Amino acid sequence: MAIIIVLLVGVISLAVWWVHQNFSYWKRRGIPHDPPNIPKGNTSELMKTRQIADLFRETYSKYKGKTDGPFVGFYLYLKKIAIVTDIDFVKTVLIREFDKFHDRGLFHNEKDDPLTNHLVAIEGQKWRQLRQKMTPTFTSGKMKIMFPTVLEIGNEMIRVFTEKITGGPQPLNVADLVSRFSADVIGSCAFGLECNSLRNPNAEFVTMGKAAITERRYGKTADLFFFGAPKLAAKLRMKETVQKVEDFYMKIVRETVDYRLKNNVKRNDFMDMLIDMKINYDKGNKQDGISFNELAAQAFIFFLAGFDTSSTSLGFALHELAVNQDIQDKLRTEIDTVMAKYNGQLNYDSMRELTYLDKVIDETFRKNPVVGHLIRICTQRYEHPNGKYFIEPGTGVVIPTLGIHHDPEFYPEPEKFKPERFDEDQVLQRPPCTFLPFGDGPRTCIGLRFGRMQIVVGLALLIHNFKFEVHPTKTTVPLKFKVTDVLLCSEGGVHLNVSKVPR
């Protein structure tokens, strides 16, 4: 009994020592940081009253220019994080010293949870090889091929909006409608499916997509374990994907691939490109090919990433345009003028002429970046000229996108919506890495061309056909963000008054 008590005391003492060492890490090194609380670190308000990107923004704003180094310390529960406060160091992490910061530290388990084995999460040489294989599928030439599909679904969205306001101006949750537009676009391009969620909001393809984002296999607290110890979670054979979601998407991918191969179906979409790579793999060309599980994972993340980010950004843009009627009018004039040159139609080439629309989209990304922070994991020790600001392998590095985008040094009056910030002369005045909606460097978002094309088509068609205004009781100004989500998204949707533009 005495031996058991001694062992128990020893284990408790060791645990207490480890916790103390962990939470005194930045203090021992002399790195500025806010005092942590045990066990939540600097995140006691997280998911209760504050969204995570907002916490990082607050830390960035508090310490920027007030320390002798390029980052400050932060504790995300037990995880040690360096929050970047110097814009030049952002470039170091994302570009100059990318070889030391190329991983995101996200959970992936190829064997037990195949849908997590996607380009966003995988690491090291495996990521490099897959990125190289996937890059040709997102060229401007490939976007031009997929443009007619996006436009066709965009026109269907206009018909749905029109039907909803037949009796006159109506308050609509535009966030819900544009998310269904995004789902139909990606469902078609990534899976070759006629989802028709614009007509049927309960379409299984979309409900499963929402389940993939919102539901948890083990509960939300397990997210901390997946983030804090992703490699251990994989070794323990844990799975992040909800089983019904995995079963559904693996099934439809398999059926889609089998059908196209047996019937020699070609749609010139994203799935066709993945199937071509699978054929290479099956023929023994693993250098240029991908396995079926890899194919399924890429299709899955293409849907999730595009569904969430593109549709949310489109909703944010409509909200900003409703609040700023002068900007909406100016944008509509440009869209109408360009479309008139092409017989009232939108086509791939005409998109290049929508220069003010590009600025509206960029300002939306700037003010309300859906991905409000970028995270990297240090894989090799980084040495800084100021010796105490080294970064050890395994340390998380956060680039506070929301904070940078709202920094008055780079964007005066950051809470104002001003598309002119993206006039060429203003862009050239800002340092590199001050605009990061898709990241930067080798690990920038591979699907940014597709996401942007989708937003351009959706926004151009909507503003050409409808006027969006603030509803006196249903519109939230300014936007309120959900504190429980990792990505920025509006609390309760985006409700606007919608009316037909007279022609």
Image (cartoon, rainbow, N blue to C red):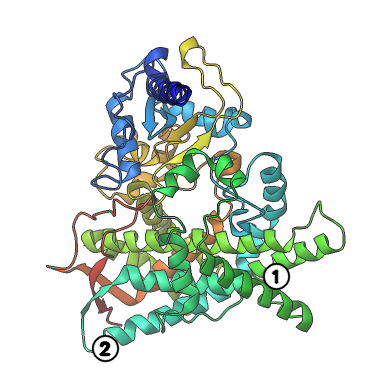
Q: Pinpoint residue 152: horizontal percent, then vertical percent.
A: 51, 79
Looking at the rendered image, the quarter that the N terminus falls into is top left
Q: Pinpoint residue 454: horizontal percent, then vertical percent.
A: 49, 65
Which element type, helix, strand or loop, lies under badge 2?
Answer: loop
Q: Residue at x 58, y 78 (%)?
A: 193
Q: Is residue 36 visible?
A: yes
Residue type at the position of mark 2: Thr
Bin the neighbour count of mark 1 within 10 Å (Cα to Cα): few under 14, some 14-19, many 20 and up.
many
Q: How many marks?
A: 2
Q: Pinpoint residue 77: horizontal percent, then vertical percent.
A: 38, 35
Q: Residue at x 30, y 41 (%)?
A: 54
Is 259 rendered above or below residue 239? below
Which element type, helix, strand or loop, lies under badge 1?
Answer: helix
Disc marking residue 166: 2
Bin the neighbour count of mark 2 within 10 Å (Cα to Cα): few under 14, some 14-19, many 20 and up.
few
Q: CA distance from mark 2 to mark 1?
A: 39 Å
Q: Nearer the viewer, residue 486 or 6?
A: 6
